[in-house]
Amino acid sequence: MPILISISPVILFLILINSLDSFKLLKLNIIIYAIIWGIISAIIAYPINTFWFSTFHPNIVYSIAAPITEEILKSLIIIFFFYKSKLGFLADSLIIGFAAGTGFSILENLFYVNQIETQNIMLWIIRGFGTAIMHGSSTAIFAVVSQNIITKKDNTLIHFFLPGLTMGIIIHSLFNSFFLPPLILTILQITLLPLIVIQIFTKSEKTLKAWMESQSDSEIELLKIINEGEFKNSAVGKYLSSIKNRFSTEVMIDILAYIQLHLELSLKAKGILMMKEAGFVPTINEEIKTMLVELDYLYKSIGKTGMSVLKPLIKISKKDLWKINLLK
């Protein structure tokens, strides 16, 4: 019974927030990786926290050292996914952040169940609905805040993660410091968290729809110009003519091919997003896989200098990289 009470709330809440995502953009394996990393980070945190307890007063460990250690460890998988352009919107970050915290809390609570022999059900209720949910929430908030900053800056720099990490550590520290009775903290947490989650999902879906609408018209128009042979006289064609002396003929051909292929894949990705929103499960056919392989080849052939001249022509932001990753 203690095991069930201490780990089931956080698992059920993770399932709930994932089910609320109408677009279902995250692949199951990414969520599983986050959970597994959460478990691994709990294993790594144990000897580190043991050292802190041997060095500092327990109150310092609970309120400062442990929150810093644990939040940094949990956040590493989120940072990795950001650098790999696997997280595009707030809902994705919320789910993955909570998944990492879920993995951590599962192992931590299993450890406490084996270490503490007590029939006090209230203790396990507080650990299940309180501490476990706190671990998920603090990492989720880190991920959401980081997503917001990275989206605005359109870049992934390590210091962009500091505000979210600081917020996660503060939440963790306040919970461990018992500035309110544990039962009151638990009630507040399970009351406020669903409201916060709903707000984040609402904002995420509005942002995604607005982003899709803002891009589609321009991409369709540019692709139409290319396919109808009007590219040379277009603004894009004139721009490329102005820089053609900087590259060999072969590279210019690859640049043109990259533009067309990127636009086609971008529109296919938007089609997948619309299918997901409508409740369908899209499949990635062999044609798309071949196009992705060709896109990677062209990217390497063009090189960083060639890609830099494409920025005024096609959107290659963090969200656009994430969008292409949907097809993989």
Image (cartoon, rainbow, N blue to C red):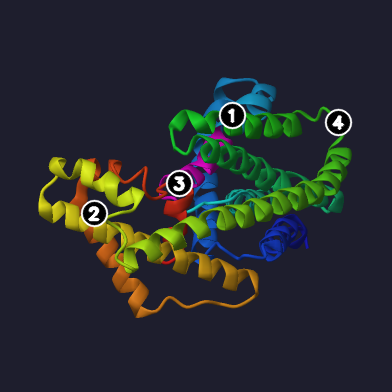
Residue annotated with mark 2: 255
Give how far apart the Cα atoms at labels 3 and 1 are. 19 Å
Residue annotated with mark 3: 318
Q: Amino acid at mark 2?
A: Ile
The residue that appears at 44% across and 60% down in the rendered structure is 221
CB contact under 8 Å: marks 1 and 2: no
Give how far apart the Cα atoms at labels 1 and 2 are. 38 Å
Q: Nearer the viewer, mark 4 or mark 3?
A: 3
Quick check: 271 left or right of 14? left
Q: Amino acid at mark 4?
A: Leu
> In the rendered structure, which disc, 4 or 3, sits on the residue that comes first in sequence?
4
Give how far apart the Cα atoms at labels 4 and 1 are. 25 Å
Give how far apart the Cα atoms at labels 3 and 2 are. 20 Å
Q: Is residue 196 magenta?
A: no
> In the rendered structure, which disc, 2 or 4, sits on the residue that comes first in sequence?
4
Which of 2 and 316 lies nearest the eye of the viewer? 316
- Dot 1 falls on a residue whose secondary structure is helix
Q: Residue 109 — which label?
A: none
Q: Nearer the viewer, mark 1 or mark 2?
A: 2
The residue that appears at 58% across and 57% down in the rendered structure is 213
Q: Which residues are magenta?
A: 69-85
Quick check: 223 left or right of 33? left
Q: How many marks?
A: 4
State the image coordinates of residue 188 (x, y, percent, origin top left): 86, 42
Residue annotated with mark 4: 180
